[in-house]
Structure formats: structure tokens, C-alpha cells
Image: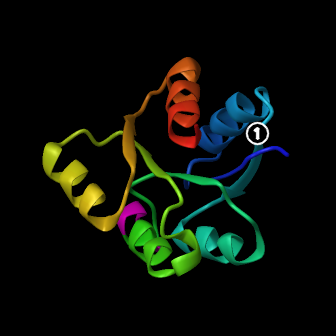
């Protein structure tokens, strides 16, 4: 069975790049436009991993991570932040919220795939 990854980003072009990269390697991808959309899609799907932007309207990535971690069914689901931010304090904040890892944009497809494979095993 294919692993399912939820990608949450307000940029359509980033969602498209992430989706294309992952689907090309056999992953099933569900796209969400912001944190609220991501939470709604988590309710309807079985998700193996979340890749989320940090800076989004309505609900940012750290708030999304906190919301996801409140659901016992997603307590151990890997969550990767994919963002232009690279400050250490933001990384610490994301980890404290429950993020598993961090990738800085712009990303290389092979870099994204390496992280996904490492985290999903």
C-alpha cells in the first residue's frame, strides 16, 4: 500500500512541486491550502506523514503541528516543516510543538525524498 502524505502550504506552486516529487516515487499526496484545511483533511484520511509550511494565513505551521499533536491518533505521525525560515529559535519552537524535522526552501527534490524516506523508514 502506498504511503499517504499531507502537504500543507498556501503556495500552489510549492504544493505542486512537493506533490509531483512525491507522486513520482509512488507516494499518495493530499494537498491542503492552510492549517485549517490541513486539519479538515486529517479528519477524512489516513495520513502517514505531514509536510507543512511555517508561514501561512489563518493557521500557521506551528499552530498546525500543535493541533495535530493534540489528536492521539496522530501523536507519532512524522511532521516536517518546509519553509523559507531558517532561524534556530523558530526550529526550537517547531520541535517543542512536535515537529519531527525541518527543510529550508527552496528544496531539491532529492533532498525532500531523502528526508521522507528516512522519516517513514
Q: Is residue 37 above or below residue 91?
A: below
How many numbered discs? 1
User: With 69 as the anchor, is 4 left or right in this view?
Assistant: right
- Between 28 and 108, which is closer to the camera in this rendering? 28
User: With 102 as the anchor, is 120 left or right in this view?
Assistant: right
Q: Is residue 83 above or below residue 78?
A: above
User: Which picture quadrant has residue 13?
Assistant: top right
Q: At 52% across and 69% down in the image, what residue appears?
A: 35
Q: Where residue 95 sits: x, y (%)?
A: 28, 56
Q: At 70% across and 34% down in the image, what residue appears?
A: 22
Q: Residues within 10 Å of mark 1 (few under 14, many from 20)?
A: some
Q: How is the image coloured?
A: rainbow
Q: Which residue is mark 1?
A: 27
Q: Where residue 107 sits: x, y (%)?
A: 47, 26
| Residue 103 part of the magenta segment | no
Q: Main secondary structure of the magenta part?
A: loop
Q: Where residue 8 sits: x, y (%)?
A: 58, 56
Q: Quadrant of the C terminus?
A: top right
In this view, the residue farthest toward the front is: 121
- Between 75 and 82, which is closer to the camera in this rendering? 75
Q: Where residue 61 sits: x, y (%)?
A: 41, 61
Q: Is residue 72 above or below residue 74?
A: below
The region drawn magenta spans 58-62
| Residue 60 part of the magenta segment | yes
Q: At 65% across and 55% down in the image, what residue appears?
A: 48
User: With 52 as the anchor, is 14 left or right in this view?
Assistant: right
User: With 42 as the anchor, is 64 left or right in this view?
Assistant: left
User: Which picture quadrant has residue 96?
Assistant: bottom left
- Between 73 and 103, which is closer to the camera in this rendering? 73
In this view, the residue farthest toward the left is: 89
Q: At 76% across and 68% down in the image, what residue appears?
A: 45
Amino acid at each position: 500500500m502506498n504511503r499517504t502524505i499531507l502537504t500543507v502550504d498556501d503556495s500552489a506552486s510549492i504544493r505542486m512541486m512537493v506533490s509531483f516529487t512525491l507522486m513520482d516515487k509512488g507516494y499518495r499526496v493530499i494537498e491542503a491550502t492552510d492549517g485549517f484545511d490541513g486539519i479538515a483533511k486529517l479528519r477524512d484520511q489516513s495520513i502517514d506523514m505531514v509536510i507543512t509550511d511555517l508561514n501561512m494565513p489563518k493557521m500557521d505551521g506551528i499552530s498546525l503541528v500543535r493541533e495535530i499533536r493534540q489528536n492521539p491518533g496522530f501523536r507519532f505521525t512524522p511532521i516536517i516543516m518546509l519553509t523559507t525560515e531558517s532561524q534556530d529559535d523558530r526550529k526550537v519552537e517547531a520541535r517543542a510543538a512536535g515537529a519531527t524535522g525541518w527543510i529550508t526552501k527552496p528544496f531539491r527534490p532529492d533532498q525532500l525524498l531523502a528526508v521522507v524516506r528516512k522519516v517513514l523508514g
